[in-house]
Amino acid sequence: MLHAETRKPLAAVYVKVYAQMRDGSVKFYKDGYTDLRGRFDYASVSTADLQNVVKYGLLIASDKDGAVVREATPPLR
């Protein structure tokens, strides 16, 4: 996650991920915080769910910088 104006990485920003599955259902997928580089691995989980995900919805929220919702596609397999 990058700051909108400075384009610098934002560490410790909360990310909540939902996944739309192939059957049309939507479910909570994972959550956590960005690392010191402003990165969060939204796709990796320790189950086989990744192969059934069509797209992700991510809530990215910072106490200081506000919140944004983004969509993402699954990584190439």
Image (spheres, rainbow, N blue to C red):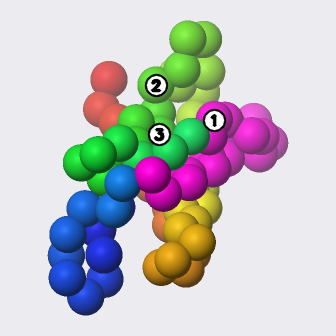
Residue occupied by mark 1:
30
Give amino acid for label 2: Ser
Task: Specify which label sits upstream in the sequence, 3 or 1.
Answer: 1
Q: Position of residue 17 (x, y in %)?
A: 61, 47
Give amino acid for label 3: Tyr
How many numbered callouts?
Answer: 3
Residue occupied by mark 2:
44
Q: Which residues are magenta?
A: 12-31
Residue occupied by mark 3:
42
Q: Residue 16 magenta-drawn?
A: yes
Q: Could you say which quadrant of the image residue 20 lies in?
A: top right
Q: Quadrant of the C terminus?
A: top left
Give SS at disc 2.
loop
Q: CA distance from mark 3 to mark 2?
A: 6 Å
Task: Specify which label sits upstream in the sequence, 1 or 2.
Answer: 1
Q: Quick check: can you spot residue 54? A: no
Q: In the image, what residue occupies the spot 55% across and 52% down?
A: 15
Give SS at disc 3.
loop
In the image, residue 71 sits, relative to residue 30, either above or below, namely below
Q: Nearer the viewer, residue 27 or 54?
A: 27
